[in-house]
Image (cartoon, helix red, strand yellow):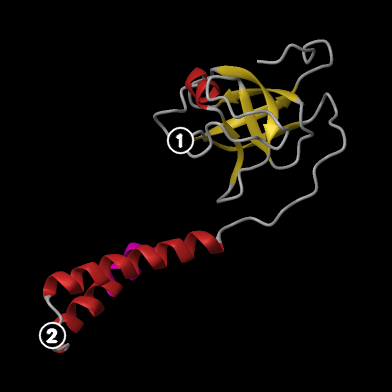
Amino acid sequence: MPDLLVWGLSCLLTLGCGMTAGMSCAHARHATRHAVRHARAAHHHLRRLPPVAPMQSVSSTWSQHGLASWYGTHREIGHRTASGDIFDPGAMTAAHRQLPLGTRVRIRAVATGRSVIVTINDRGPYRGNRIIDLSPAAAREIGLLDRGTTAVDIMALPPEEAAWPHG
């Protein structure tokens, strides 16, 4: 949400404090924070990306460039991923909207040049313009944990490199 809109909401609600009988300034500040939080949540809801059909197969020459992020807060830990696995923040896994579950790919961070091989075991990300969400362990390997997001290149692994066990 643009900061100007947040500022405008704050100003309007704060001005209302002086004009509303019986409303304390503390109550008006609470109302302002609530309105701003609600407006931000509505804004994020609008940015949710529509679902796309998963790919049935992936060519060994497939690649993609875009923004990566990481996920794995306490909310995800212990829950099942789209593949049925229990989410493990220490595993080298990732969520992609279209790649077939079980696909192994190499993720290379453009900023650091570091790369990691991950297995796609979940769906996402669904917000913003991100193309892949990495587990915390995979994000740490490429220097993403402190950044939040970073530009990456994703490359499908040739069959001989994509063999199990996955990590």
Q: Residue furthest front?
A: 78
Answer left or right for 122 relative to 67.
right
Occupied quadrant, residue 36: bottom left
- Residue 165: x and y, percent? 74, 11
The answer to whether any part of residue 46 appears in the image is yes
Q: Residue at x 26, y 70 (%)?
A: 32
Going from the N terminus, do you reach mark 2 or mark 1 first?
2
Dot 1: element: loop
Q: Is residue 164 magenta?
A: no
Q: Of helix, strand and loop, which mostly describes the magenta segment?
A: helix
Q: Which residue is mark 2?
A: 22
The answer to whether any part of residue 1 appears in the image is no
Q: Which residues are magenta?
A: 2-8
Q: Label 2, label 1: how many angstroms apart (C-alpha)?
A: 41 Å
Answer left or right for 51 relative to 116.
right
Q: Amino acid at mark 1?
A: His
- Residue 38: x and y, percent? 39, 66
Q: Amino acid at mark 2?
A: Gly
Label count reads 2
- Residue 132: x and y, percent? 62, 37
Q: Which residue is mark 1?
A: 74
For the N terminus, the image quarter is bottom left
Q: Residue at x 59, y 20 (%)?
A: 91
Q: Residue at x 71, y 32 (%)?
A: 84
Near mark 1 (Cα within 10 A), the count class, few <14, some 14-19 or many ≥20, is: few
Dot 2: element: loop
Q: Which of 111 and 147 lies nearest the eye of the viewer?
A: 147
Near mark 2 (Cα within 10 A), the count class, few <14, some 14-19 or many ≥20, is: few
Answer left or right for 139 relative to 32.
right
Answer above or below: position of 75 versus 11.
above
Answer above or below: position of 5 versus 16.
above
